[in-house]
Image (cartoon, rainbow, N blue to C red):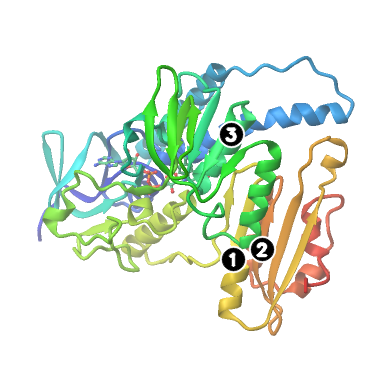
Amino acid sequence: MTHYDVDLFVIGAGSGGVRAARMAAGLGVRVTIAENRYLGGTCVNAGCVPKKLFVYASRFREDFIAAKGFGWSLNTPQFDWSHLLAQKNQEIHRLQGVYEDLLNHSGVTLIEGQAHLLDVHTVRIGERNISCKRILIATGGWPSVPNIPGKELVVTSNEMFALAKLPKRILIVGGGYIAVEFAGIMHGMGVKTTLCYRGDKLLRGFDEDVRVFVAQEMHKKGIDILFNTKISAIEKNENSFMACTDKNQQLEFDLILYATGRTPNIAGLGLETLGVELDAMGAIKINDDYQTNIPSIYALGDVTNRLNLTPVATAEAMALVNGLYSNQPTPVDYDNIPTTVFSQPNVGTVGLTEKEARNRYPDIDIYKSVFTPMKHTLSGLDEKTLMKMIVRRSTDKVLGIHMVGSDAGEIIQGMAIAIRAGATKAIFDSTIGIHPTTAEEFVTMRKPVD
Ligand SMILES: Cc1cc2nc3c(=O)[nH]c(=O)nc-3n(C[C@H](O)[C@H](O)[C@H](O)COP(=O)(O)OP(=O)(O)OC[C@H]3O[C@@H](n4cnc5c(N)ncnc54)[C@H](O)[C@@H]3O)c2cc1C
């Protein structure tokens, strides 16, 4: 029998890699993990966690305005970006420590450095060659910026988490969730914010009503949105940047953020030499067992570019490890995965969009409600909430639930359980609401829209 130095070598200590490494080690597998940048990966260091902390910070501005409507008087609040940055860094440092402890306590060997594959059973890191029975690639994704003149002048989401100072005016290019979330964050922090997108609606792939509604709400708050506009070049002035559009506009900003997508992080891994199959986007192709076309090499998470979310990467990690090393397989069900855009207001969604449902079934009922949440009856803020439910008439099954409004993420998590359990509209109707809440609207929508 061939002897290997380790049973499983994991490349990348992000959401998926760390979960796979420590689960496998917990089952007695000899695991080594390599990380070249930061423990915890994108989510902890340049994604979900710092982003959500920034969202919290940015929401205070409206809360201060709303407070007046409820009888509070405040001196002019001041915002200190460097204080927030220091607090955020401290929290991330703490989380990195948690990840390190988790790996140590589960017996995983951690090696800091850039790993690449020498052959289908050997990883090279630093000066060491390590032979491994299996190799798991969990190297995540990386922001991509289109090739336009001046692309070196822009920042990506990575740099947004460490800006030396806040700009006065920012241009955010993109229409996906990262662009939309940063628009809310920057606007909330008092930065004059312009969002520029080449399409005619934000958040491609989401329900059409949601796409329209969220843009209207963002616009009402004071974010400029330029639809159907492409940036053709970026130039630097003495103290600012000019963005030239395909409509011959010259727009001046202090900072330009490109949130125009992420590409699988495979650079330098040596995959091409070994013949590991990639798709047209450079994502690693895998089968249902997360195995590449090379039997000893596996991949999961963002580097496979399927559903690029932290809980998906961790679920895939558990499915892989349980499939390989335990008798209790836990396959991932990719249907009805809920997701939230931490825009302001939030978007929360689970299940089919109206378009998907109508393409699939002939008998669809739509329940929809747009209203002013109770808080804004006194807050002085003009913010509306959208709630939408998609039901198949013949089975009464709820196929999709979509919301734009405060705490949509928190609300939709519960809705996702109901949808996964196969809840019918009748079950929703017979559920007693919690009053007074926004969420109760989901159990009191009685009449489908025409
Ligand atoms: C701005 C932003 C906001 C986000 N917000 C959310 C959110 O709110 N909710 C959500 O669910 N998801 C969110 N995501 C997505 C989420 O961060 C990813 O889906 C998740 O981190 C993917 O995990 P992963 O394990 O595949 O990769 P990652 O977490 O990216 O980990 C990959 C790791 O591999 C390391 N690595 C790469 N190459 C090598 C190498 N050759 N050798 C050694 N190490 C290597 C990298 O340094 C990295 O640490 C967000 C992403 C971004 C960018």
The numbered mark at residue 351 is 1
In the picture as drawn, the residue positioned furthest to the right comes out as 71
Sequence order check: which comes first, mark 1 or mark 2? 1
| Residues at circles 1 and 2 in contact by the CB criterion of under 8 Å | yes
For image coordinates 35% across by 42% down, the residue present is 145
CA distance separating discs 3 and 2: 25 Å
For image coordinates 56% across by 20% down, the residue present is 81
Where disc 2 sits, the SS reads strand
Residue 419: percent from the left, percent from the top?
Answer: 64, 67
**Residue sitting nearer the eye, 26 or 115:** 115
118 lies left or right of 87:
left
Given this view, does label 3 or label 2 mark the residue nearer the observer? Answer: 3
The numbered mark at residue 119 is none
Residue bearing mark 3: 185
Residue 328: percent from the left, percent from the top?
Answer: 42, 66
For image coordinates 56% across by 54% down, the residue present is 201
Which quarter is ligand 1 in?
top left
CA distance separating discs 1 and 2: 6 Å
Where disc 1 sits, the SS reads strand
Residue bearing mark 2: 401
72 lies left or right of 208:
right
